[in-house]
Amino acid sequence: MTFQLDLSVADLLLLLPEIFLTLWLCLLLSLDFSLKRMTHQQLAYLSIVGLAVTGLILLGFDQAGTTGALFKNMFVLDQMGIFFKLIIVGATALILFMSIEYVQDFRFFRGEYYVMVVMSALGMMFMASSNDLLSVFVTLEFSTFGFYVLVAYLRDDQRSSEAGLKFFILGVFAAGLLAYGISLVYGETGTLIFSEMTGTAGSYGLAIGYILIFAALGFKIGAVPFHAWIPDTYQGAPTPVTAFLSIAPKAAALAILIRMFYVSLASFKPMWVLLFVVASIFSMTYGNIVAIAQKNIKRLLAYSGIAQIGNIMIGLAAGTKQGSDAIMFFLLTYLFANLGAFAVIIAVSRVMKSDEIEDYSGLNRRSPFLAAAMLLFLLSLAGVPPLAGFIGKIYLFIAAMKEELYTLLIFGLINIVISMYYYLIVVKKMYINEPTDPSPILASMPIKIAVYVGIAGTVLLGVYPGPFIDWAVSASLMFSNIAGPTAAASLLPGG
Amino acid sequence: MGEYSLLIILFAPFFGAIALMFVPRQEALLVRMTAAISAGISLLASFYIFLAYDTAKGGFQFVQRYVWSEELGIAFYLGVDGIGGPLVFASAILLFAGIFVSWHIKDRTKEFYMFLLILAAATIGVFMSLDLFFLYFFYEMSVLPMYLLLGLWGSHTKGYLGMTDPEGRKLRDSIGFIFNFGSNSKEYAAMKLVLFLSAGAVVALMGILLIYHLSGLHTFDIVVLREQAHFSDTVATVIWMLIFFGFASIAPIWPLHSWSPVGHAAAPAATSMLHAGVLMKLGHFSIIRVAFEILPDTTREWMWVAAVLCVFSIIYGGLVSYFAKDTKYVIGYSSSSHMGYIFLGMAALSYISLSGAVIYMFAHALATSMLFAMAGWVYDQTHSRDIPSLGGLVEKMPFIAGAFIVACMASIGMPGTINFIAEVMIIVGSWDTYPFQVVVAVLGIVLTLAYMFKMMRGLFYGRLDPEYAHADDARHWVDRMPLILLIVCSITLGIFPGHFYEVVRSTVEPMVDRINHMAPLITQNTQGLLP
């Protein structure tokens, strides 16, 4: 296979958001080095401007319907890719708002922090567009590299270093699994590009290869049984990084999962549906039950995140176009609620200097605004109407119902009730318990912006989801002819 | 204007809650006035729909339909029939009264009214939803504010573990104690309530999703589903069971009742009023709206389940009320007991019994909320709900005592109150089908008489403990107005039930015909309602 790059400038246009962000990244880095007078806040706002421009370009692509594939289908820009990239860019911008105050406490490398965040975002944008296994591997490593650094950023803090080490070791292990899986799949199919694998016959090598790839991606999204790193890493990492970890890599990895399973494994659907049903049930149940026992709010959200990934996998288990629409819509709702919740956590921990749930006692008396915001975010995560999370969950359930996955639905519904319990425990602390120290908690302006965006998104997606649902629907039009469960192929020979 | 009245009723409290966000919390009077005005608008508009409901035409009226999501088959579809209309009216009355009853709440007044308005608006939303999705949406939305209302402004319960019968033996609500780990705190009550109701809600949600998918229509539109949805027998039975027990948990039918008295006891007065008055009726209403409309055949086949369980509700609730010492437990268990009458009326499936059940929902809302309002007043004045230690309060609070007697009479079903009409209709209408249950129901009325008199005597007559010498009557109009409003409504409708009965009848008769196969499947006037 020879590689000929016959690219025109017009083709490169498809890469414009990534190219722009790369150049902007270089600009940020050089400004940080050269301009001594430049404060880290200015750098942060400059990064946000860069992300905003990237977002605008992506929106322009979305409006104009620009799509196409580059580098022999390794990089594909389609509506779905644009959707995921917008989620990643939006999440990154919000993370930067949340970071500004937090970075103040770093003693060194304040400027580099923003560069690392934007670089990870860039890697994840490539992930959302990767269309073959090689680019999956490269972009996954590219984005994770930034996170290895970011998680351990508080280098004097033992927990942060521990988190970094755990994340690194398990991350590298996952990368190894991914590489091994890719090599098996390549050996069986002779190709790396998703769309060319559709017709291949099943074999043990292929099955093992895909299971290994699923394990590596399951590590990224934190699905049971690949979740072990999540609680410690979430707890130890700097809170804005935790927030970043909780949404952006999951979105990017989901883009890959959807592409891989919906396109290259379409003919083996009955088999991977089972895989996702099992993973989803275990993730939801494990995440929700263990979350009940948590005393630390970041760990609570870590386990709640595992449960939410279980919810998201309901959509993958449905394996239909509606399933992927529901996943995309759910990610939007999760983005606002989860990032909003982390913004409140940052604001509170600035004053309390810790993240225990006990610290939230009487938050309503100390800061009615933050308490009300946290209430909205937690209830949205719990799936209470009229908030976004409710619509997201119902959408996933409808997708699963249309595929008649009754067992999965029953577990999903039971888990709603279980999750209600631990979210309400936090609500109880905030509203019912009296504060030990009644001094007010004030949030800085950038944090407030993140909280306001979170509230706006959570409420808007809850009461007026129509346009967003339509957006999700049109973003995955390419799956409208996804193979039904009638496809008789088996991933295993003779099975 | 008229056609938008449902939107006004529904959104006035919501906008009131939003407006309250911008009212500074120091301005307590402004906060209360904002809440009162938004509730007042809602009350006026609901009074209008109650009067203007066209009984000759029947069916769903004041219909509003906006497509919400084409992809999922959801429309924001509002409309009331002769069952929803009166219940919307009852909710608006109780909300308005509740705002005045809680006029003296000092702690976080703003939040209290916000949550109260959201609770009431969500309840109203259920009563007017013609889309299963929105029915569930508002249903679930009404549960959550209860957690905060109970947890923040509620009160701990002391007397629960110490219920004794006349011979001094300790009694326990055994069913209630399955999930009660000896805790009597308001937080426990609030959590129990929310988890219980959410569990019921997701069971019902499973049923709703099954209807959505297995009908093959992929729509949540009740009007379309009731005409076109057909299920095989087994499937219909499964769905019916999910819907019935899911929604019956809020009704609450025995043995799913244990959250309710605990919740009532912990809740502040206005919340108990809304909770016992209308929130519990969401269960019956949703069963009627979903099971009776969409699964008429299965309803005819399986409604005996309700007739069996209602016996336990009536007797069990009545006995616990008789032995309970805490005023709010007495009223709470009496509510659970009285919910059995509604189930009996629904199970008998005759014109008169089902109309009686609907009227009873309304009547019970008024009567029980009066009782809760006054139990709340007594508690505020004396900080006690323990009946044996109270007594002689009639000297201190003649107005409250008088109103309390009227409320007790209404609850018992004295002629002249709307409760009387409802009870008689249920008893007469159910005699043919369920004579045994009717005998039990009549015994239940005797039991009601006994515990109401016992509570009345315990609170207001006998020796006044000097500890409560500072207790005061409701003197200000703000305190008297809600009670007078409720009493006037109850007695006016009790004496002139004509229009009310016509409204209910116009919907109930076609519905019963349809369930009993005495009419063609399309019975109501649905012209212009199908999309």
Image: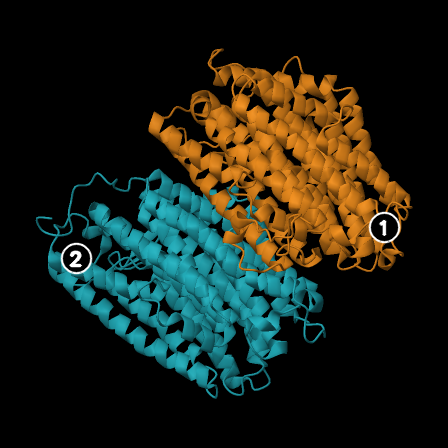
Chain colours: A cyan, B orange
> What is the distance, in whole Å, between disc 1 and disc 2 at their CAs?
83 Å
Residue plotted at (43% across, 31% down)? B240
Q: Is residue B408 left or right of residue A225?
A: right
Q: Is residue A304 left or right of residue B501?
A: left
Q: Considering the numbered disc 1 on the image, is that residue within a helix, a strand or a loop?
A: loop
* Same chain letter for marks 1 and 2: no
Frontmost residue, B58 versus B153: B153
Cβ–Cβ under 8 Å for marks 1 and 2 = no
Give residue B463's mark. Answer: 1
Please report, as a chain letter, where disc 2 is located. Answer: A
**Label 2 packing within 10 angstroms: few (<14), some (14-19), many (20+):** many
Q: Considering the numbered disc 2 on the image, is that residue within a helix, a strand or a loop?
A: helix
Q: Position of residue A492 (x, y in %)?
A: 12, 52
Give residue A207's mark. Answer: 2
Q: Position of residue B417 (x, y in %)?
A: 76, 26
Q: Amino acid at mark 2?
A: Ala
Please report, as a chain letter, where disc 1 is located. Answer: B
Q: Amino acid at mark 1?
A: Arg
